[in-house]
Image: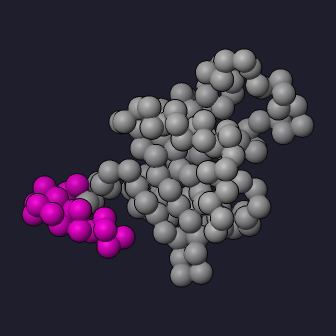
Amino acid sequence: HWWGDLVVSFAACMEAHIATRRLPAETSYWICAYANRQHTLQQEIHANPLKCSFFKALETAGFNVLVILDDQATPFTRIWCAFEETMCLDRPAAPLDFAVNTPSGVELITQGLTIEEVQLEASRPTTGVAAKAAR
């Protein structure tokens, strides 16, 4: 995420993620801008990025990441966002999900199927995948 969007849009994406992934309502999100001292970030940056606070937070969260996109997909142009995404992609079991708040509502792309989609797929093959495509 980057901080050019409204916080309300950001919150809507998190709410949609919680609902779609069927996460507990009290699910916590680590948000860099709130978790790091933005005026002293140089103290957080190390020669080895695996020792920085960004990596430690990812590790603590089990590399579960929600990337919130704006209409320019700005997170793909930011080096720390790319670092975090890469760390998730290096761990195939860790979900890397994407959300964007559009005028018609939040759109969410999940890595893999959601719990509901897995259940559909188990009861009738291809219906879970079809439900994901429709979502």
- What's the residue at 52%, 33% (across, down)? 87
Q: For the magenta stretch, what is the residue range? A: 118-135
**Residue 47, quarter of the rendered image:** top right
Give the residue furthest to the left.
124
- What's the residue at 31%, 68% (across, down)? 133
Position of 67 with respect to 117 (left or right) is: right
- 5 w.r.t. 56: above or below: below
Residue 134, horizontal then vertical, whole percent: 32, 73
Most prominent secondary structure in the magenta stretch?
helix
Residue 115, horizontal then vertical, whole percent: 29, 54
What quarter of the picture does the C terminus occupy?
A: bottom left
Q: Is residue 62 visible?
A: yes
**Residue 58, quarter of the rendered image:** top right
Position of 118 with respect to 64 (left or right) is: left
Q: Is residue 83 magenta?
A: no
- 5 w.r.t. 60: above or below: below
- 48 w.r.t. 24: above or below: above
- 3 w.r.t. 58: above or below: below
Of 21 and 43, nearer the camera is 43
Residue 29, horizontal then vertical, whole percent: 59, 45
- What's the residue at 69%, 27% (across, down)? 53
Number of callouts: 0
Position of 38 with respect to 50 (left or right) is: right
Q: Is residue 24 visible?
A: no
- What's the residue at 22%, 62% (across, down)? 128
Give the residue furthest to the bottom.
104
Position of 129 with respect to 15 (left or right) is: left
Residue 59, horizontal then vertical, whole percent: 54, 28
Give the residue furthest to the front.
77
Of 51 and 12, nearer the camera is 51
Q: Is residue 131 magenta?
A: yes
